[in-house]
Structure formats: structure tokens, C-alpha cells
Image: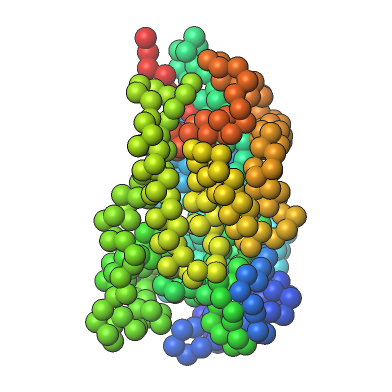
């Protein structure tokens, strides 16, 4: 890139950061780290700053994708996973944005973002899907133009899980007599490119976390930041952050193409020791796996029902992982990972006292993360005080996407208590996470093939 172009890009991005952050963050250009964000003023812990989408984000609903592809083929009507669907949905968003751009100013922010050195290379995924987009889109944007734009996406995009649960249908297809749909309490996966997120450095001891509420991406400070402090997030998940120095650096080099030299990694390099987490890495891996598979009891149980010991073990795994998150991010922070674990405990706690205590802690975490009056705070308050409202919101979520609303009951048992119904709805979500996603009108839903009888 020519020096004049680089200076113009920096000026554009700097102006946008100042505007979007309302003067709280500043873009700087350093010799050793390149462009990065710092705090422009003193920021307290829990400070929320809404980010600006460079492009409309994709999601596991697949709305952009469903509108951009030529329908009617197996490849466009059935996608292998939630993660793949959200990525394709974001690719469709990029294509539509480029096709509708009147002039260069419509995509100037994208063009100003960092890209890996070298010329744009052929991207098999783009070439493969370019033959399946609608003709009016591919006649406006060539595969080579998509590949050039993609060079600005790859170093900067993220895939995130939405914090707020929503009502979605999951189903089975195949034999018409056996096919059925269930209501699941689910979490959308979003894939996108946001301004400040793209400019933010990685750290294995981040100063901020990213939280998505289903509509917007938010920066939330994990601790007080003085003016000029680095604004960092982590590119690693909880399991990755708990790993030793060598493993963290290996993952970052493989996925993101750099060797981490953050404060934590530098300190561990100099001392030749890693601060041990509360639990061993192999134990953390097992706990994470267990938390994604709650025991099943009641009408939706297949086979033997879960025992009291199964439930105690599950709740204990949730609580131990909460300790792990607090060890990583500080005892006063309430990041999305902690909020998600508290929600599971609030949903699946066995006694009334445990439910009330877990719901209260979950509500407090939601207040810290998104603020009073936010959608998630309202949902958490309803779970604490009036869980019937959570069922009503689930029905409203389905109506919003035009889904045909089945009865909010399980056929084998009428009038389930709201909390029991929520447990089953969450269990449906977990059971469907490895299913393919099939097109249902203007959106996609998780769907499992019914074995032929």
C-alpha cells in the first residue's frame, strides 16, 4: 500500500472510531504493533460501547443466504452446520453489499481495513458458491472481486454466540408419519465484521470482552482503564485461554498468523512458568463437554432418565467452570461466558432455593453485561420472577421469523410447569447443535433425518 493511501485509510478509520465510541476510544498507529485501539479517557469497569458493523452480520437463521442463492438444490437447501451457515450468510451479506454499492464510498471502511500481505488468491469456497448465487448478483460482482474483498474480511472477522436466548424450531424430516418439530430455547450464532473489533489487538489477558445481544456488538471493559491504556480482546475461547503458553501461541499462529507477545505471554516467557488455572486443562475440557450435554429427565428423555447424581455432577461442573471464568477475567467481571454458565444453572438447578439463587446471580450478570432495560436483562428478570413470561417471549420469537407455532407443550404431558418446559426447550437446543440446517421458507432450522422404518 502506498504511504498516502495508508495515511488516508488511517485518517478515515480514526475519525470513525472517535465518532462510534463517542470519544472514549482512539486509534493509534504504532511502529511495533501497527494500528490498535487505546482508551481516550479513563474508563470504569463494565463500560459498554456499541460497535459499528462494517457489513450486515450473518447468522444461523440464514436470511441473507436464503435470499441470495438460487433455491431448489440440495446444496443450497441443506447446510452442514450452524457455523457453516452463519459464515455463508455473512458471505451472502458481503456479496449483496458489493452488488448494491453505488460508488467506492459505500465500501470505503471495508477497503481501509488491514489485509494480509500479498495479492488476493483464489478462494475455493468463494468460487464454489459463486456459481450458486442469483444471476442478478453475480452479474454485478465477479468471483475475483469477491476474493479481493475477502482479503479484508479474513484477518478481521469473528463468529460469536448471541447471549440472549430465543425461541426457535428444531425438527426431524423424512418419514411424514414420524417427522415432527419441537420448540427449542436456542442461541443464534452470528458471523460478522465490526469496526472496532477489527482494529482491536488480541491479548491472553484482555481488557475488554465482546458481547452480542442479537442485534448489536458491544465492547465491555473488564477492569478500569486509564487514558492511553491498550484496548484488547481475546481471539481465543475459554478453553484456549486456559492453555499453557506454547499451546496458546500455537493456536494463534495457526488461525491468525502471528506469535502472541501480549503482557501475559511475555511475562510467562521471561519467568518460564505459566500461572496454573484452578483446574487442569484436561479437566476443563471434560467440564466444557459435560456442560453442553445436560442430563435429560421427564417426557423428552430417551432411554434411562437422569439420576440425582447425574444432576449434581452437572451443576457442579457449571459452578467449577464459573470459577475458571472468574480466574481468567477477574472476580468483579461478568463476561458472556459466565452469563451463559449462570443461565444454564438457573435453568437446570434442581431445588427451588438453588433455582432462585442461580436466577438472581444470572440477572445480576445480565445487568452488568448489557444494562438495565436491555432485552437480556428483561428476559433474566422474567426468569427470576415470572418464568411464564419467558414462554410468551419464546412464542413471540417464533412469530417474528414467520415460523408456524406448534403447541408450547410436550405431547406426552400437558401443563408442564414453566421451568420444566424451559429445561426441555434447552435440552432440544443442545440435542440439535450437531444437526444439519434445512431451509424452511425464508430461513433455516436445525433438522435431523428420521431413519426410514
Residue 198's spot in the image, x, y percent? 55, 69
Q: Is residue 364 above or below residue 386?
A: below
Of residues 376 and 196, which is closer to you in this image? 376
Residue at 35%, 50% (x, y): give it. Answer: 287
> For the point 31% across and 80% down, which residue is it?
268
> What residue is drawn where x is 72% and y is 54%?
374
Q: Nearer the viewer, residue 68 or 295?
A: 295
Q: Residue furthest front?
A: 353
**Residue 8 % position (x, y):** 64, 82
Q: Residue at x 34, y 83 (%)?
A: 266
Q: In screen coordinates, is 267 left or right of 89?
A: left
Query: Where is residue 376 drawn, in percent x and y?
Result: 66, 50
Image quadrant in which you'd find residue 199? bottom right
In the rendered view, does 327 fall on the left or right side of 57?
Answer: left
Q: Is residue 230 visible?
A: yes
**Which quarter of the figure has residue 257?**
bottom left
Quadrant location, the C terminus: top left
**Nearer-the-camera pick, 41 or 35:** 41
Amino acid at each position: 500500500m502506498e504511504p498516502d493511501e495508508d495515511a488516508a485509510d488511517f485518517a478515515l478509520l480514526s475519525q470513525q472510531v472517535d465518532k462510534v465510541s463517542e470519544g472514549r476510544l482512539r486509534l493509534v498507529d504504532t511502529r511495533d504493533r501497527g494500528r490498535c485501539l487505546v482508551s481516550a479517557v479513563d474508563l470504569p469497569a463494565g463500560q459498554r460501547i456499541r460497535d459499528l458493523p462494517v457489513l450486515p452480520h450473518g447468522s444461523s437463521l440464514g436470511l441473507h443466504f436464503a435470499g441470495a442463492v438460487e433455491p431448489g438444490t440440495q446444496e443450497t437447501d441443506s447446510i452442514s452446520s450452524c457455523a457453516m451457515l452463519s459464515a455463508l450468510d455473512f458471505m451472502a451479506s458481503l456479496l449483496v453489499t458489493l452488488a448494491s454499492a453505488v460508488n467506492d464510498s459505500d465500501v470505503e471502511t471495508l477497503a481501509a481495513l488491514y489485509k494480509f500481505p500479498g495479492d488476493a488468491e483464489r478462494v475455493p469456497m468463494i468460487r464454489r458458491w459463486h456459481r450458486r448465487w442469483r444471476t442478478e448478483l453475480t452479474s454485478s460482482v465477479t468471483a475475483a472481486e469477491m476474493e479481493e474483498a475477502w482479503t479484508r474480511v479474513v484477518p478481521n472477522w469473528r463468529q460469536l454466540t448471541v447471549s440472549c436466548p430465543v425461541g426457535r424450531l428444531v425438527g426431524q424430516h423424512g418419514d411424514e408419519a414420524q417427522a415432527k418439530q419441537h420448540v427449542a430455547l436456542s442461541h443464534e450464532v452470528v458471523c460478522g465484521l465490526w469496526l472496532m473489533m477489527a482494529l482491536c489487538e488480541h491479548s491472553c489477558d484482555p481488557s475488554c470482552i465482546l458481547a452480542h445481544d442479537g442485534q448489536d456488538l458491544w465492547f465491555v471493559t473488564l477492569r478500569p482503564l486509564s487514558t492511553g491504556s491498550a484496548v484488547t480482546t481475546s481471539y481465543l475461547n475459554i478453553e484456549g485461554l486456559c492453555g499453557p503458553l506454547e499451546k496458546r501461541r500455537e493456536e494463534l499462529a495457526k488461525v491468525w498468523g502471528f506469535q502472541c507477545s501480549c503482557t501475559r505471554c511475555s511475562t510467562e516467557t521471561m519467568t518460564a512458568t505459566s500461572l496454573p488455572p484452578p483446574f487442569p486443562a484436561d479437566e476443563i475440557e471434560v467440564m466444557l463437554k459435560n456442560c453442553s450435554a445436560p442430563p435429560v429427565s421427564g417426557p423428552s428423555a430417551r432411554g434411562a432418565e437422569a439420576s440425582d447424581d447425574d444432576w449434581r455432577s452437572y451443576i457442579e461442573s457449571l459452578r467449577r467452570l464459573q470459577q475458571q471464568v472468574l480466574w481468567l477475567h477477574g472476580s468483579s467481571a461478568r463476561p458472556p461466558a459466565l452469563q451463559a454458565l449462570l443461565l444454564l444453572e438457573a435453568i437446570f438447578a434442581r431445588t427451588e432455593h438453588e433455582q432462585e439463587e442461580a436466577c438472581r446471580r444470572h440477572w445480576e450478570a445480565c445487568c452488568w453485561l448489557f444494562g438495565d432495560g436491555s432485552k437480556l436483562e428483561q428476559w433474566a428478570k422474567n426468569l427470576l420472577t415470572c418464568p411464564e413470561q419467558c414462554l410468551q417471549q419464546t412464542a413471540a420469537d417464533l412469530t417474528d421469523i414467520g415460523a408456524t407455532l406448534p403447541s408450547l407443550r410436550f405431547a406426552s404431558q400437558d401443563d408442564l410447569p414453566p421451568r420444566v418446559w424451559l429445561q426441555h426447550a434447552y435440552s432440544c437446543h443442545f440435542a440439535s447443535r450437531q444437526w444439519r440446517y434445512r431451509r424452511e421458507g425464508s430461513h433455516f432450522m436445525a433438522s435431523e433425518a428420521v431413519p426410514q422404518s
